[in-house]
Amino acid sequence: MAEKTSNGAGIRLRDVAVRYPNSDRDAVAGVDLDVPAGALVVLLGPSGCGKSTLLRTINRLVTPLRGSIELDGIDVTQTDAQTLRRGIGYVIQAVGLFPHMTIAQNVAIVPQLLGWPPNEISARVDELLGLVRLEPARYRERLPRELSGGEQQRVGVARALAARPRVLLMDEPFGAVDAIVRLALQEETRRIHAALGTTIVFVTHDVDEALRLADRIVVMKDGRIEQVDTPLRALAKPATPYVAELLDAHDAIRRLGLMRARDAMVPLDGRESIARVEPDTPLRDVLSMLLEGADVVTVADGRGIVGSVSFNDIRAALTATER
Amino acid sequence: MTFLERHPGEVALITLQHVELVAIALLAACAIALPLGIVVARSRRAGPIVLAALNVVYTIPSLALLALLVPVFGIGTLTALIALTAYALMILVRNVAAGLRGVPFALTDAARGLGMSSRQTLWRVELPLAFPVMLGGMRLATITLIALATLASWINAGGLGTLIIYGLQHDDPSRALVGSAIAALLAIGADFGFRRLERLVRS
């Protein structure tokens, strides 16, 4: 993809606290968090845990009581709020599209606010609709309500990416679409993230969504961070009983869904089987093949056999994650 | 309807006068109601005060309001216009505020999050989305004003009331009937027109 620049900005939060008026407790209670440039970080927790509020401090939709928020070392309060927001993509649930504007007008909003020339905006709209796999000629002039929930959400992502933001904030963006469409949108999110290198902060209460998407998962409870880790580490070594319960961390099968055949593979040892997988196949699928009767599963890539996995290899790999 | 046959020119002129009263009052009221409605929708403190003040005006019987205004503004068209505008205000301000309040939070949140200023959010998102509700208010205000404007002739401001009052006072029912019928037709026509417009902007 032509845009591959890995131009994401790093985000640094220090002692961020938020209290809403008429509330006697902090919605966010002194949070430190570092989001590396280009990472996809998921804030996970039940409703009311402060994850959305924390997200909204980054583009200043919420003003913290105290603490500092820096984008690439620059305090967000140093930038005029509107200028800041135009440089940060923002995606919310499907309802966020403006119903009285066409798809093209919706996508064009930020470039227009930034004063881009019309022909450049028009070209950018086509490019973005292509990026989220909506054929520009078919979709440009339609109104949001003429689109399915999943299509609307793709437009929401295109709109947020319009002015090439270095940070993309996504607030439960796929909450309103059905499970199958949600899976496809998650796939798209990963693909776009890989292609653009934009830093993404993603809020969800859906554990599976968080595990599937995150480079790093941030588990929150009562306005505080319980654990920041890779999904696999969080599952294998939950920092608190709360994290263990939320993630259902005792479920070894869940962990295997995040591991690959190559993680358990014993390199070329002569064992061979008609059951074959690729190095990237989730271990969960490998386990399923073993349970269905194979004694050993052969791992092969494009060039040939690279190793094999047995039941014991999987057990050993699982144990290794707990160390 | 012999009166209508004998004086078509006069009836047309009076009708036009009536429409003029309503149209000018409505335009003036719209111009004032828009900023007031925005204040009512936005301000927790000033909003209720504005609404309460308008409510007081609205509860004064229409004839009494005219009587109150005459010592200040004299008799004539200006006074009638002021009274009509004041009545329309209540209806319009309420609808502007209701329309703005009806815009889902997610949309204003998205607008802010994309970097629109509050003025841009108002003009590009909130007002366009509130417009159908505002049109409903204009329809109601227009119908009300068409009826109320028949009272304008009491203070020598013309309109269809001229026919109605003269007819009643001089035992000339056909004249009063013509005036009433035209007023009713105007109201029905306005209702129809605005409803079509509402359907058009909603689709």
Image: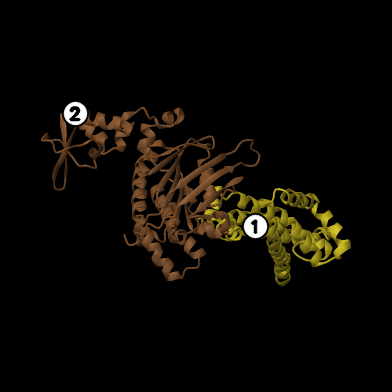
| Residue B72 seen anywhere in this rendered image of the structure | yes
Relative side of A188 to A26, left or right: left
Foreground mark, 1 or 2? Answer: 2
Residue A3 drawn above or below residue A54: below
Under mark 1, the amino acid is: Met
Between the residue at mark 1 and the residue at mark 2, the CA separation in whole angstroms equals 72 Å
- Quadrant of the image containing the N terminus of chain B: bottom right
Q: Secondary structure beneath disc 2? A: loop
Q: Which hue belongs to chain A?
A: brown
Front residue of A71/A258: it is A71
**For mark 2, what is the residue?**
A292
Q: Chain of mark 1?
A: B
Quarter of the image holding residue B121?
A: bottom right
Percent position of residue B154, x then y: 83, 61
Residue A274 drawn above or below residue B69: above
Residue positioned most to the right: B71
Percent position of residue A242, x then y: 46, 29
Quarter of the image holding residue B71?
A: bottom right
Which chain gets the yellow colouring? B
At x 30%, y 36%, the residue is: A257
| Residue B197 seen anywhere in this rendered image of the structure | no
**For mark 1, what is the residue?**
B138
Relative side of A75 to B181, left or right: left
Front residue of A203/B110: it is A203
Front residue of B121/A77: it is A77
Q: Secondary structure beneath disc 1? A: helix
